[in-house]
Image (spheres, rainbow, N blue to C red):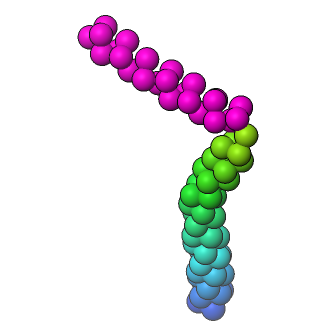
Amino acid sequence: MRSRFDDMRDSAKRAILYGIGIVLAIVFVRLAFAYALILPRLVIARFTSDLLGTGLILVVIVLFVVLALLHRRKN
C-alpha cells in the first residue's frame, strides 16, 4: 500500500509536468503566430523586389478572379 507522502509527491510531479507542458504549448503557439505574421512580409518583400515575383503575384490574382467569375457563371 502506498503512503500518502508518495501520492503527494506524484501529484507534485504531475503538476510540474503539466505546468511545463502548458508553458511549452504557449511558447509554440506564440511562435507559430509570430511566423505566420512575419512570413508573408518576407515573401512579399523578396518577391516584389524583382519583376518576376511581381508578375507571379499578378498572375495568381488574375487566376483567382477568373476562377471566381467562372464559378459565378456556372451557378
Name the residue: 42% across, 23% down: 65
Query: Where is residue 40 shown, x and y percent of the image?
Result: 60, 50
Which region is colored magenta?
51-75
Whether residue 40 is in magenta: the answer is: no
From the image, which quarter does the N terminus lie in? bottom right
Of 39 and 22, nearer the camera is 39
Of 9 and 19, nearer the camera is 19
Q: Quadrant of residue 9?
A: bottom right
Q: Which residue lies furthest to the top in this view?
A: 74
Residue 25 visible, this angle:
no
Q: In which quarter of the image is residue 10?
A: bottom right
Whether residue 74 is in magenta: the answer is: yes
Q: Residue furthest left?
A: 75
Name the residue: 70% across, 35% down: 51
Q: In which quarter of the image is residue 35?
A: bottom right
Overall secondary structure of the magenta stretch?
helix
Query: Where is residue 50 shown, x and y percent of the image?
Result: 73, 40
Residue 26 visible, this angle:
yes
Q: Residue furthest bottom?
A: 5
Name the residue: 56% across, 30% down: 58
Residue 73, placed above or below residue 17: above
Name the residue: 71% across, 45% down: 49
Of 35 and 43, nearer the camera is 43
From the image, which quarter does the C terminus lie in? top left
Residue 8, placed above or below residue 34: below
